[in-house]
Image (tube, rainbow, N blue to C red):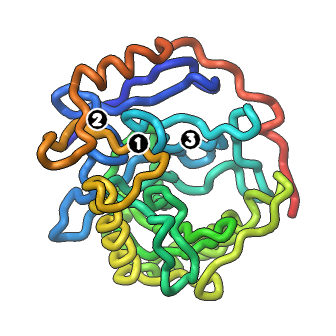
Amino acid sequence: MSFTVEERGKPNSLDYRMFFKNAEGKYISPFHDIPIYADESQNIFHVVVEVPRWTNAKMEIATKDLLNPIKQDVKKGKLRYVANVFPHKGYIWNYGAIPQTWEDPAHKDEDTGCCGDNDPIDVCEIGSKVCSRGDVIKVKVLGILAMIDEGETDWKAIAINVEDPEANDFNNIADVQRLKPGYLEATVNWFKRYKVPDGKPENRFAFNEEFKDKDFAIEVIKSTHNFWKALISKQTSAGELNCKNTCFSASDSPYYCSADEANSAVCQTCPFGKEEPIPTSVDKWFYC
């Protein structure tokens, strides 16, 4: 199973979008149409890479837009970049999301005591390769961190690309602690403080900031997949989410989007153009 991307608009601008296509060249939603599993029997999951390691642009699957392209988050009319909180430059992993998952904002998690954040489940991929935006990779999940972001449960799964040269050495969260000492502590510190330069308080975590193991993580992912199934079948209110998809037949999902509708939606966006410069302020360092 392979996927390609089509960029529209100018990179580093408000009109930039990255749309996804399947092997047949058909537009798809990375939220709804890419399968959660690359190999269900081995618990190998697909991850859509939104933010490559060491970059600052806060790119994300646009859950409220038709076809859910990747675009840059906007705050007060300006493109959003995460701050460099010393000693970290941008994101310290390849950051992305598992398709066909959804953290239901109406469901209060019994472990965290908070409801979901209304997004697909986030993944920090810790392999050696710096991925590209829009890559769809296959990962082994190793563990998970329960972040509480402004009162919402925001799970952060830790995973490694199965094609990474060291993938065979990593099978659970304890392997990360043993083979990449300091990485998990840095991950907690990153998530705790990345919003502080914006004037927000530190984020907090369930389980005393401890990572839960692989089995726990997989059960969390499976539960969010079930929430997504309820969402896509209209058993749960979608609210502002756009659940249109092109791979489910009209009889399987009430949100079916025809190829003509998908093509029209992409054509209405700006053609791909020369990238805009990144503001120099993005290079500033913050010390917390």
**Pointer 1 or 2: first along the chain:** 2
Q: Secondary structure at mark 3?
A: strand
Q: Secondary structure at mark 2?
A: strand
Q: Which residue is mark 1?
A: 242
Q: Which residue is mark 3?
A: 59
Residue 182 in which image quadrant: bottom right
Q: Position of residue 60 (x, y in %)?
A: 52, 44
Mark 1 or 3, which is nearer the eye? 1
Q: Is residue 192 left or right of residue 249?
A: right
What amino acid type should be assigned to the residue bearing mark 2? Ile
Residue in the image at 46% along x and 36% along y: 65
Q: Is residue 247 above or below residue 123?
A: above
Residue 73 in which image quadrant: top right
Residue nearest the observer in this picture, 108 or 59: 108
Q: Is residue 96 left or right of residue 267?
A: right
Label 3 crowding class (10 Å Cα cut-off): few <14, some 14-19, many 20+? many
Label 1 crowding class (10 Å Cα cut-off): few <14, some 14-19, many 20+? some
Label 2 crowding class (10 Å Cα cut-off): few <14, some 14-19, many 20+? many
The C terminus sits in image quarter:
bottom right
- Disc number at residue 29? none
Q: Secondary structure at mark 1?
A: loop
Q: Which residue is mark 2?
A: 28
Number of numbered tags placed on the structure image:
3
**How far apart are the two marked residues, 2 and 3, measured between alpha carbons?**
18 Å
Residue in the image at 48% along x and 56% along y: 119
**How far apart are the two marked residues, 1 and 3, measured between alpha carbons?**
18 Å
Q: Is residue 138 above or below residue 66?
A: below
Residue nearest the observer in this picture, 143 or 253: 253
What amino acid type should be assigned to the residue bearing mark 1? Asn
